[in-house]
Image: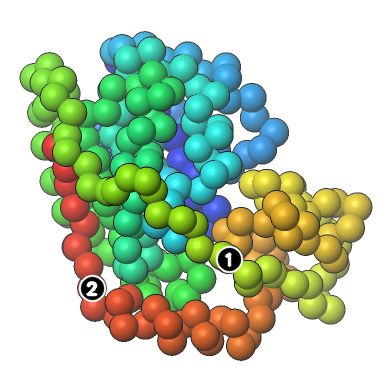
Amino acid sequence: MSIYNITFSPTGGTKRVADILANEISSEFFEIDTTDRTTDFSVYNFTKDDVCIISMPSYSGRVPKVAVERLLQMHGNGASAVIVAVYGNRDYEDTLIELRDTAIQAGFTVVAGVAAIAEHSIIREFAANRPDKEDKTELQSFMKTIVEKIRAGVVQQPAIPGKYPYKEGSARPLIPYVTENCTKCGMCSFACPTGAITVENTDTVDSSKCIFCMRCISLCPHEARKIDFDGYEALRERIRPICEVRKNNELFI
């Protein structure tokens, strides 16, 4: 049995959750980073004895489209999948059920689902520093239960929350812009999951490709990328009522 940690984590929150879960199974596992647009994901052929932890962020209650496309390139071949939707303490809505459907379409056998909290990727004060110690303990407990199910050979699929049709994705208009601090090092271009920034012209963001994942902002060594302050404040106040109260992680098994 091999363990695979499959993630789409532009700012690192989803990866922190995924690592807690993966390390509870084994200290040795294979990493598959679906933010890397240069990877040919069709080379991944799993076996029914493998366990894959598939962790994706919730963007406006949905799995990022590019992450869906890359997961569908893989060949599950009946491998056990633990699907994980990570959100910034607002809501994950149809993310988990969309991830389940995508994993099944890719040939995985979904054995469990987890909805987990990580620091909001845009408004960092919401769910700040999560997953925290309490989250870690809870997520480790979840994985112990999941491993017991896998080892017992139970194949019953869990009931996953969500609705059909999936909710419409909300507009994400806060496209990052470049400040005078930019040195044109190209880090943002190489790291962008969708290729919305070219190394030849780092000053421009292709709005048709940008998914507002905040990766370019989080990785820039010179803090040269920003989002519109008024738009940021408007979003902050709009989601504050639902994001201020601590939400709990959930296990579906």
Tell me which residue sits at (64%, 47%) in the image: 193
Neighbourhood count class around disc 1 (C-alpha, 10 Å): few under 14, some 14–19, many 20 upward? few
| Residue 185 left/right relative to 169 | right
The residue depicted at 49 percent of the width and 57 percent of the height is 169
Q: Tell us which disc is closer to us: 2 or 1.
A: 1
Q: Mark 1 points at which residue?
A: 172
Q: Distance between the residues labelled 2 and 1?
A: 24 Å
Does 176 sit left or right of 17 as displayed? right
177 to 212, vertically: above or below = below
Q: Which mark is on residue 246?
A: 2
Q: Locate the N terminus by quadrant.
A: top left
Q: Where is residue 230 in the image (x, y as percent from the top left)?
A: 61, 88
Residue 120 disc label = none
Give 107 or 122, whichever is nearer the viewer.
107
| Residue 28 visible in the snapshot | no
Q: Which residue lies furthest to the right in this view?
A: 200
**SS at mark 1 in the image:** loop
Residue 239 in picture, x, y percent from top left: 39, 78
Question: Is residue 235 placed above or below 101 in the rendered structure?
Answer: below
* Residue count near mark 2 (Cα–Cα under 10 Å), binned few <14, some 14–19, many ≥20: few
Q: Which of marks 2 and 1 is nearer the N terminus?
A: 1
The kind of secondary structure element at disc 2 is loop
